[in-house]
Image (cartoon, helix red, strand yellow):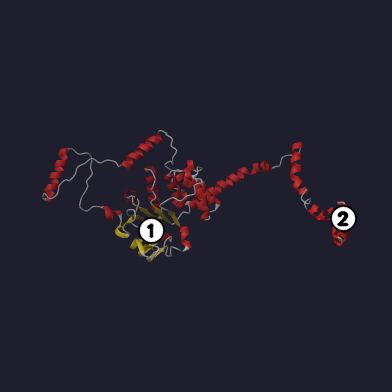
């Protein structure tokens, strides 16, 4: 088994009051690990210690006891930060920036070059259905749209470990399904994902393995099949049956089991509310009804699929072709206008004026000591006369 990306061993976190007395034991002797390429679920009700555990993994909080390791290093090691994408429980965004500027900002924090930055921003905006709203200030976004931007910024650096804390909070059913599909796709592409949520239905379809917390302690751990498959009952699904056939099957079951077992329930299957909702939305989209919110989004960004090198090669080819096509036009664009006509002469004189006048400010400063030669010496003598010898001295200087 490969080395775990995240290791928590007997981790405990106690928050203290002003007098350093134990106030809250948020996490108590918690142990688990996350393997590479695994979608791991951290579940529990509100206040069970999920967010506190994530903050200790990120190095934002220091554990009171136990050990936390990330990529084999301490969570406080700066070198591991660039390999992590993090979506906090609440979206903290700059409201005066628009969606594109927000993603550009986070991309620059990871020192992505201009070409990579622009490509990833375009792909993420399209993937999350925000391309039509990319120039609107984030403060005008709904909570669900802000959540989508938060997910985009968590993916902008193509992280090895993606940590999502309540990613579907505020999202409509369309966005919720899209995020679940994205998590499944990232797991299939080899990403390691830590998904924290108290919405069990959002996690059940996504995770490979999970831990359920309550009161800061681990209450259950395992795969979905290990924890969810009931061993006490068997379900058989067939096409629609009439009552006589059901009765015969029931008699057969009773006969084979000695009368201890029988059909417990016969019902018609029904689709989930999520499927009904999405079906209605798809029909509305087919009718080309407009919406002011986020759309359903596009395909997964290419850099998240692992084919970034191929995409860059294609971009280089297109850029080279574009440069070659634009070459004959460049001299025409760069050619100066003919210097004829009175208007051009005026503009030329204005442009050259600063150069011609550049030495002018220096000359007056050099000539300032000679200015008193133009002053009437008798007036100065009359003003200085009452001072006696000083006056004569002043006249001599003048």
Q: Residues within 10 Å of mark 2 (few under 14, many from 20)?
A: some
Q: How many marks?
A: 2
Q: Please report the residue visible at 35 percent of the width from the left and 37 percent of the height from the top.
A: 280
Q: Which residue is mark 1?
A: 52
Q: Which residue is mark 2?
A: 381
Q: Nearer the viewer, residue 318 or 137?
A: 137
Disc 1 to disc 2, how far (Cα)? 88 Å
Return the x and y of residue 398 as percentages of the image width and height: 87, 57
Residue 89 vertical position relative to residue 56 in the rendered view, above or below? above
* Badge 1 element: helix
Residue 57 located left or right of residue 204: right
Residue 61 picture quarter: bottom left
Residue 149 vertical position relative to residue 70 in the rendered view, above or below? above
Q: Nearer the viewer, residue 26 or 154?
A: 26
Q: Nearer the viewer, residue 36 or 140?
A: 140
Q: Going from the N terminus, do you reach mark 1 or mark 2 first? A: 1
Determine which of the numbered discs, if any, sits on residue 19 in the image. Answer: none
> What residue occupies the far front of the structure in this picture?
386
Closer to us: mark 1 or mark 2?
Answer: 2
Judge whether residue 343 can be spotted in this image: yes
Q: Nearer the viewer, residue 97 or 128?
A: 97
Residue 256 located left or right of residue 163: left
Residue 227 located left or right of residue 323: left
Residue 386 located left or right of residue 301: right
Return the x and y of residue 320 as percentages of the image width and height: 58, 47
Judge whether residue 1 can be spotted in this image: no
Return the x and y of residue 285 as percentages of the image width and height: 40, 36
């Amino acid at each position: 088994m490969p080395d775990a990306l995240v290791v928590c061993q007997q981790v405990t976190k106690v928050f203290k009051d002003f007098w350093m007395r134990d106030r809250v034991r948020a996490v108590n002797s918690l142990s688990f690990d996350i393997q590479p390429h695994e979608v791991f679920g951290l579940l529990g009700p509100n206040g069970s210690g999920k967010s506190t555990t994530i903050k200790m993994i990120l190095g934002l909080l220091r554990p009171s006891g136990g050990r936390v390791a990330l990529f084999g290093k301490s969570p406080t090691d700066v070198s591991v930060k660039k390999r992590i994408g993090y979506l906090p429980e609440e979206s903290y965004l700059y409201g005066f920036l628009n969606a594109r500027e927000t993603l550009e900002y986070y991309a620059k924090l990871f020192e992505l070059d201009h070409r990579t930055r622009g490509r990833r921003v375009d792909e993420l905006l399209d993937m999350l259905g925000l391309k039509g709203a990319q120039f609107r200030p984030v403060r005008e976004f709904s909570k669900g749209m802000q959540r989508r931007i938060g997910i985009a910024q968590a993916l902008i650096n193509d992280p090895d470990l993606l940590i999502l804390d309540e990613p579907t909070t505020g999202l409509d059913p369309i966005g919720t399904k899209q995020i679940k599909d994205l998590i499944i796709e990232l797991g299939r592409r080899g990403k390691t994902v830590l998904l924290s949520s108290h919405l069990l239905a959002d996690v059940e379809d996504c995770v490979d393995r999970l831990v359920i917390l309550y009161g800061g302690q681990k209450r259950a751990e395992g795969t979905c099949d290990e924890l969810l498959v009931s061993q006490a009952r068997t379900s058989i699904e067939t096409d629609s049956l009439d009552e006589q056939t059901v009765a015969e099957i029931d008699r057969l079951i009773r006969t084979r089991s000695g009368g201890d077992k029988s059909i417990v329930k016969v019902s018609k299957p029904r689709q989930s509310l999520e499927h009904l909702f999405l079906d209605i939305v798809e029909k509305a989209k087919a009718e080309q009804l407009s919406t002011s919110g986020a759309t359903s989004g596009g395909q997964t960004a290419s850099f998240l699929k692992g084919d970034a090198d191929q995409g860059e090669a294609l971009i280089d080819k297109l850029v080279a072709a574009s440069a070659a096509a634009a070459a004959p036009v460049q001299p025409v664009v760069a050619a100066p206008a003919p210097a004829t006509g009175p208007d051009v002469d005026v503009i030329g004189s204005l442009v050259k004026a600063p150069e011609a006048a550049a030495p002018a400010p220096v000359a007056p400063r050099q000539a300032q000591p000679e200015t008193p030669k133009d002053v009437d010496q008798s007036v100065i003598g009359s003003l200085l006369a009452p001072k006696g010898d000083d006056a004569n001295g002043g006249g001599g200087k003048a």
